[in-house]
Amino acid sequence: MRKFFILIIFILSHVVLVASPKYEMRAVWLTTNWGLDWPASPATNERGAKQQQSDMCAMLDRVASMGFNTVFFQVRLRGEVLYHSAIEPWSAVVSGASGRSPGYDPLAFVVDECHRRGLECHAWLITIPAGSVSQVKRQGMSALPRRYPHLCVKLKGEWYLDPGHPETAEYLAMLAEEIVGNYPVDGIHLDYIRYPAENGRFPDAGSYAMYSQGEPIEQWRIDNISHIVHTVSSAVKDIDEAVMVSTAPLGRYAIIDGFPESDWVCMEGASQDVEQWVADGDNDFIVPMMYYHAENYFPYLYDWVQRVGDNGFMVAGLGAYRLNPQTGNWLVEDIEHQIRAARHYGASGHAFFRMQHLLQYPLLMHRLAGYYYRYPALIPPMRKVNAPDIEPVATLQLHTGNEADSLVWQPVDGAVRYAVYASVDDSVDIADATQLIYAWETDTMAIFPSARYRSFAVTAIDAFRRESVPVYCRPTRKATSF
């Protein structure tokens, strides 16, 4: 039966062609740790800073051209950050020395450049790891284990924040508050929000004795991670409810009977009760790192979608790095099968790890831009929102010209952007993703080549990613609202 189930899923992933959805998160992880994706070199002078900015713009241009709509930008590494912080030092990755400014603010720059291109920018934070022994030594007195020794423990040459210490949650929440309070980010994305792979040998006997109140250690650790997620999420939402909070958990939530067993799953291996995080509203969406093949991907994809249900949405993390001969030697078709399966089983998008691996494979880029992401997509709306619906646009008008037509409307209170639809027929169907022309229009005007379309519709989108009812316009009649 197990083999039959795998075969059915595998066949469907090859032959089922799921239409491009209107709502879909299309994300990429932009890794700054060790400069893996960016920057190519530290900025030690103004010229170096300008080169970093130029490289970033070129990278984001390519991301936008492929049809992506979201970037997870890694802004906190291991005790160092890529923004002006009163809490942690500048990362040596951008400046060449821990604590030294690169001469500009990378997070402010990247958020602005993402928004210019219609991309959401989510600040990606490494949470529990605090750096290797050598990294901590280079950071000097600004290193986290030296500033807060009571919060940190060492395991096999690596330092970690102790999830069992109550102040750990407060410290990470302060970092999130600092970002959301000072930068117009669209989300806070938490990574390594777990006990390390050496979970069973994690040196937390002292904090367990002090804070557990006799609870079994396995459940205590699960509760610790959940408390951190809740504390960070609450801190973010207290500042701005529209900033999404997400996590990147392990790719498999729990062992599924009949499929290959592994200790490295969320519940048994890393103390991640992700299903509860979403149910409690502490995660708006999750991005499981599903860098697996065949029977280790398809059943767990389905399992994730079912567990999340209507409480949030699930984005499948795909391993573009697996295309490399040394790290998997996958075919581009393997990634395509996973994209199609994610759509077929109800996932709300895909996230690719990582940027440079994506850009190294022109065939994958071509397939995304020319087929899977050919049409734009809206970010899925937040599920748990306590706010009135946004009003529709008013006085939508089409002005025709010899070379270009322009669609103009009045701004809407609470709208952060607008979606524009167009059809070559006499009516527009806003449920048809192929008729979505602009998914991120911040102006109140859209311009088209003259006479390309026969009918139009515009919706307003609020900060929670919710659409208003559409307003329609045709060349032969005034705007009407349905």
Image (cartoon, rainbow, N blue to C red):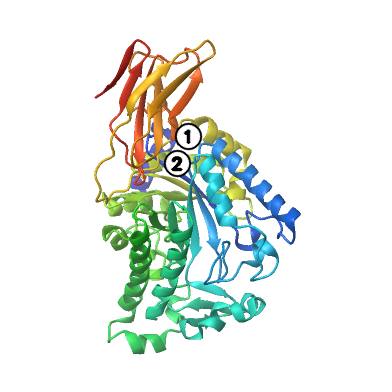
> Could one spot residue 318 in this view of the protein?
yes
Q: Which residue appears at 33% of the width and 44% of the height? A: 381
Type of residue at label 1?
Answer: Tyr
On the picture, is 410 further left or further right than 154? left
What residue is drawn where x is 54% and y is 13%? 403
Q: Is residue 255 visible?
A: no
Residue type, label 2? Ile
Q: Position of residue 69 (x, y in %)?
A: 48, 42
Point 33% across, 59% down: residue: 256
> Between marks 2 and 1, how big is the CA–CA gap?
8 Å
In this rendered view, identify the residue nearer to me: 155 or 35: 35
Q: Residue at x 27, y 86 (%)?
A: 213
- Labels 2, 1: front one: 1
Q: Position of residue 278 (x, y in %)?
A: 30, 58
Quadrant location of residue 239? bottom left
Q: x, y percentage for residue 240? A: 36, 56
Please tell me whether residue 393 is drawn above or below residue 86 in the rendered image. above
Task: Say what secondary structure mark 2 lies in.
Answer: helix
Q: Quadrant of residue 133?
A: bottom right
Residue indicated by mark 2:
339
Are the residues tagged 2 and 1 within 8 Å (C-beta)? Answer: yes
Q: Is residue 259 above or below residue 148?
A: above
Image side of residue 215 versus residue 184, left or right: left
From the image, which quarter does the C terminus lie in? top left
| Mark 1 lies on residue | 372
The quadrant where residue 266 appears: bottom left
Q: Say the numbered circle drawn on residue 276.
A: none
Crowd band around label 1 with a 10 angstrom C-alpha radius: few (<14), some (14–19), many (20+): many
Image height of 12 relative to 123, above or below: above
N-terminal label among 2 and 1: 2
